[in-house]
Amino acid sequence: MMRLISKAGTAVSLALAGWLSMACAQAKDAAPAVQVETLSKTSTAWDGEAYQAYPTGTPEVTVLKITIPAHSELPWHTHPMENTGYILSGELTLEKKDNGQKMVFKPGQVVNETIGEVHRGLTGDEPVVLIVFYAGQKGMPLSEKPLP
């Protein structure tokens, strides 16, 4: 009887060990799951102004990697289209000309730009690197100098 119990215990142990090694092999061979993280989903710019409509005409999407040196003041400018930036490094301060409103963006944050509002960017002690996605129309400038 003891021999029968011992053989049964050995069989169960071997089966369990086989099952565990198969499960580990499958987990090891399984591809990692795709992860999706929404970085921004908005209908307003960073200053709270609502976006109105996309430009008409033939669509053109532009993606730029922009590096702005430390201690820079970009010139005052506007954007005629929706654009969104993702800060990779450095700190970018955006400032509106009409009311002086400012907002600081740090690495990992999203900048939903204003449309038609005169503003500029300022950097601190280190360069700013960001990726910017522009959703415009063919031939449309990405930024413009403000009217006097």
Image (cartoon, rainbow, N blue to C red):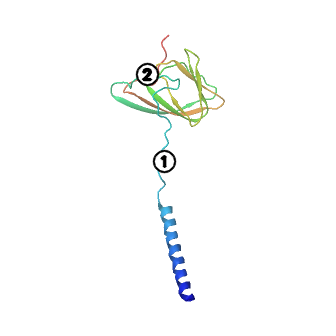
Q: Residue at x 48, y 20 (%)?
A: 78
Whichever of callouts 2 and 1 sits on the residue coming sooner in the sequence is 1
Q: Nearer the viewer, residue 27 or 6?
A: 6
Disc 2 residue crowd, few under 14, some 14–19, many 20+, Cα 10 Å: many
Seen from this angle, which residue lies furthest right? 125
The N terminus lies in quadrant: bottom right
Check disc 1 and report the residue beneath it. Answer: 35
Q: Residue 80: give its label.
A: 2
Q: Residue at x 49, y 35 (%)?
A: 40
41 to 56, vertically: above or below: below
Q: Are marks 2 and 1 in contact (CB under 8 Å)?
A: no
- What element does badge 2 sit on? loop
Seen from this angle, which residue lies furthest left? 57
38 to 83, vertically: above or below: below
Residue 132, position in %: x, y?
A: 49, 32
- What element does badge 1 sit on? loop
32 to 7, vertically: above or below: above
Residue 136, position in %: x, y?
A: 40, 27
At label 2, the amino acid type is Pro
Q: How many marks?
A: 2
Q: Quadrant of residue 99?
A: top right
Disc 1 residue crowd, few under 14, some 14–19, many 20+, Cα 10 Å: few
Q: Calculate the distance from the C-alpha at mark 2 to the C-alpha at mark 1.
A: 33 Å
Q: Residue at x 52, y 77 (%)?
A: 12
